Image (tube, rainbow, N blue to C red):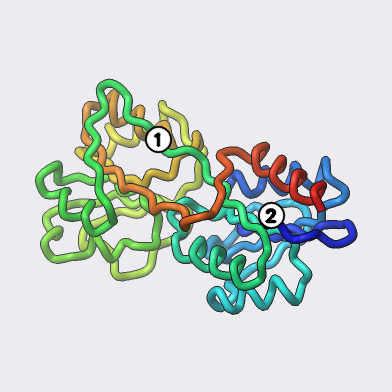
Amino acid sequence: MLRVLPVLPVHVLLLGGTTEARRLAEHLVAHDPEVRVTTSLAGRVSAPRLPPGDVRVGGFGGPEGLAAWVREHGVDLLVDATHPFAATMSRNAAEAAAQTHVPLLALRRPGWVAQDGDRWHIAGSLAEAAELLPALGERVFLTTGRMGLAAFAGTGLDALWFLVRSVDAPEPPCPARMEVLLDRGPFDLRGELDLIRRHRIEVLVTKDSGGDATAPKLTAAREAGIPVVVVRRPPVPEGVPVARTPDEAAEWVRRLYASG
């Protein structure tokens, strides 16, 4: 049962950090004067693109801290638009929503789908991805971000060379032999093909983040004929409705505050 929303404006807390989160904030601020938007950013990127509306940076201190913030700031609707692999934050959001009886929506871009010619190897975790690598190639293009590089730092992988691409510089533990490429998407096919050829990449490792900004690397791998290790994304917490686009999420917000 939906709770009755208070007098407008409706306060939406948007757990952000993704392109979809920023687009949802832009849409609501531009088209829904009845809605006050606060976007929360984790603060892991040194110079994030700030969305319109109110912005807070930093963690909440677990589900209890998030629930306390929701109560203190009069949040009426909660949207989890974090990265598809931010599983801990998604669980915290689900627990906080249950504690505060605030409606919660997960905004998740669709995952990637293998095409004809792809040589995908599916892994359930970064650790599983690391275990697959020795049999696939010695020169690895690692595009899983700077968090979690420890999975590729084991001594069993010392013979491999890694090209690590991330927005910010990684911190140890890191692979024994690596080169760091600091860059931020979107990326294009020509650039990805050039990078694969220039660094003589033999295998690509990526998370199933979905979206268009970093998808050209998959096409480049297909055209270059190299295998791709794809780390499966964690599921959305049970019972949480999912929107696939910012437009769907904006419609959910409107439907709920209109019903109040």
Mark 1 — residue? Answer: 112
What x and y, as percent, mark residue 27? 75, 42
Q: Given this view, does label 1 or label 2 mark the residue nearer the observer?
A: 1
What x and y, as percent, mark residue 189? 42, 28
Q: Residues within 10 Å of mark 1 (few under 14, many from 20)?
A: some
* Cα distance between the residues tagged 1 and 2: 26 Å
The answer to whether any part of residue 193 appears in the image is no
Q: Earlier in the sequence, mark 1 or mark 2?
A: 2
Three-letter code for the amino acid on which mark 1 is drawn: Trp
What residue do we see at 25% from left, 48% from top? 123
Location of residue 93 by image quarter: bottom right
Does residue 149 sit above or below 244 in this rendering? below
Secondary structure found at label 1: loop
What number of labels is visible? Answer: 2
Q: Is residue 76 left or right of residue 17?
A: right
Secondary structure found at label 2: loop
The answer to whether any part of residue 232 appears in the image is yes
What residue do we see at 35% from left, 54% from top? 180
What x and y, as percent, mark residue 250? 71, 43
Mark 2 — residue? Answer: 50
Does residue 190 sit above or below 71 in this rendering? above
Q: Is residue 253 left or right of residue 234?
A: right
Q: Quadrant of the N terminus?
A: bottom right
Q: Nearer the viewer, residue 243 or 40?
A: 243
What residue do we see at 21% from left, 55% from top? 128
Three-letter code for the amino acid on which mark 2 is drawn: Leu
Q: Residues within 10 Å of mark 2 (few under 14, many from 20)?
A: some
Location of residue 209 by image quarter: top left
Residue 217, numbered label: none
